[in-house]
């Protein structure tokens, strides 16, 4: 009975060690995916905030880019 219990204990510890290794791998992959997600969200936010400012400047403030004839005008 003691030998069987010892073998089961060794097997259980081995299984726990394998689960621990898998957990470490999954945590690392999850961390890299979360970092990539944050980066993409930040780039998307910057893109949309810049687009909103540009559209507001053109539509509300009527700040259109000058044409070819405006280059010769002096202030």
Image (cartoon, rainbow, N blue to C red):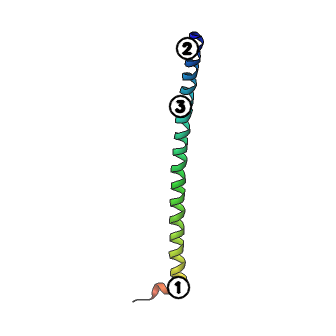
Give above or below for 42 relative to 61. Answer: above
Residue 24 x, y percent position in the rendering: 52, 35
Q: How many residues crowd mark 2 within 10 Å: few (<14), some (14–19), many (20+)?
A: few
Of the numbered discs in the image, which one, if any, rests on residue 20?
3
- Residue at disc 3, secondary structure: helix
Spatial distance from mark 2 to mark 3, Cα to Cα? 21 Å
Q: Residue at x 55, y 41 (%)?
A: 29
- Residue at disc 2, secondary structure: helix
- Tags 2 and 1 touching, CB below 8 Å: no
Work out whether mark 1 precedes mark 3 in sequence or the reverse, and give the earlier one: 3
On-image quarter of the C terminus:
bottom left
Spatial distance from mark 2 to mark 1, Cα to Cα? 79 Å
Give above or below for 17 relative to 58. Answer: above
**Camera-nearest residue between 72 and 54:** 54
Work out whether mark 2 precedes mark 1 in sequence or the reverse, and give the earlier one: 2
Of the numbered discs in the image, which one, if any, rests on residue 60?
1
Residue beneath label 2, please?
6
Give above or below for 47 relative to 17. Answer: below
Work out which residue is located at the far left of the displayed protein and give it. Answer: 75
Spatial distance from mark 1 to mark 3, Cα to Cα? 58 Å
Q: Residue at x 50, y 84 (%)?
A: 63
Give above or below for 19 relative to 31. Answer: above
Which marked residue is nearer to the observer: mark 2 or mark 1?
2
């Amino acid at each position: 009975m003691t030998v069987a219990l010892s073998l089961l204990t060794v097997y259980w510890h081995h299984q726990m060690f394998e689960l621990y290794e898998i957990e470490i791998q999954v945590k690392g992959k999850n961390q890299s995916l979360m970092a990539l997600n944050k980066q993409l969200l930040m780039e998307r936010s910057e893109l949309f905030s810049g687009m909103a400012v540009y559209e507001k400047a053109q539509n509300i403030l009527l700040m259109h880019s000058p044409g070819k004839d405006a280059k010769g005008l002096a202030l």
